[in-house]
Image (tube, coloured by chain):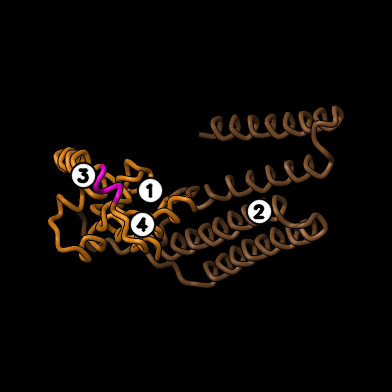
Chain colours: A orange, B brown
Amino acid sequence: MFKALADPTRRQVLQLLRHGPKSAGELAEHFPVSKPTMSAHFAVLRAAGLIDSDKQGKAIIYRLKMSVLEEALMEFSELLGLNLAQRAGKTSGHANLRKASTK
Amino acid sequence: MILKRTSFAIALAVLTLGMAAGLKYAGSLDLIGPEAARRTMQVTVGLILAAYSNLMPKDVGPWRASAAAMARSQSALRVGGWSMTLAGLAYAGLWAFAPLAFADVASTAVVASAMVITLGYGGWTLLACRSSKRQPLDVGGHV
């Protein structure tokens, strides 16, 4: 969970989902990264249990699934700019992202 | 999932009852006073309320066809979760540190206010949901 919250892109995805469920395409529009990278971010968030997804037609819809504590932790790391978890899990985090994008 | 939740709830109930019995026993042995026993029990109740409410926004339920309905139910769960969690923590804090007479009144007021906020906002979102037209999810693109 800490690794999932450590990445600013993933935190921004969670912020966007606060306003309600969004399709993967809608979310991806906000980030200058490739679709496979976004998919990998979604996979990490889903694995951490922070978001939930549903396939509707050709699209995948995501919605927020965060507890109060998880949301508070996200806010703290966002406000204080804490990247400690990111530093600690940099190597393993990147490895997870690569693994998720190859799935 | 239901079995897991029920088991957790039963375990928590057993823990609470065991704690109450333990505190009563400790009181009968003059190990703790009645005030300390009462405070300990009420702090536990506050923390249990906070722990349960913490998970409230995670319990998102089944997928709905309407984007607006899902956004509103998510918003109601978040408002309820936050208000009840903060109320639980405030309840525990008041019983831990405030004078007994003040804690008695203030803790009830805090939890009652949180319940009013939760139920009021939930009711308002339900009414808003029923009065609005059904709006399908925008499935403009996919990754």
Label placed on residue A4 = none
Residue at x 54% of width, y 31% of height: B4
Asked if the residue at tag 4 contacts the one at tag 2, i.e. Cβ–Cβ closer than 8 Å, the answer is no
Label placed on residue A90 = 3
Q: Is residue B109 magenta?
A: no
Q: Which residues are magenta?
A: A84-88
What amino acid type should be assigned to the residue bearing mark 3? Answer: Lys
Residue at x 38% of width, y 48% of height: A50
- Residue farthest to the front? B31
Label placed on residue A50 = 1
| Res B135 quadrant in image | bottom left
Mark 2 falls on what kind of element? helix
What amino acid type should be assigned to the residue bearing mark 2? Answer: Gly
Please state if A26 lies on the left or on the right of B88 as rendered: left
Structural distance between the alpha carbons of marks 3 and 2: 37 Å
The residue labelled by disc 2 is B93
Depth check, front residue: B99 or A59: B99
Q: Are marks 2 and 1 on the same chain?
A: no
Depth check, front residue: A26 or B104: B104
The residue labelled by disc 4 is A77
Tell me which label, 3 or 1, sits earlier in the chain: 1
Q: Are marks 3 and 1 on the same chain?
A: yes
Q: Position of residue B59 (x, y in %)?
A: 50, 48
Asked if the residue at tag 1 contacts the one at tag 3, i.e. Cβ–Cβ closer than 8 Å, the answer is no
Tell me which label, 3 or 4, sits earlier in the chain: 4
Q: Position of residue A7 (x, y in %)?
A: 26, 53
Mark 1 falls on what kind of element? loop
What amino acid type should be assigned to the residue bearing mark 4? Answer: Ser
Please state if B38 lies on the left or on the right of A102 as rendered: right
Q: Callout 1: few (<14), some (14-19), or many (20+) C-alpha neighbours within 10 Å? A: many
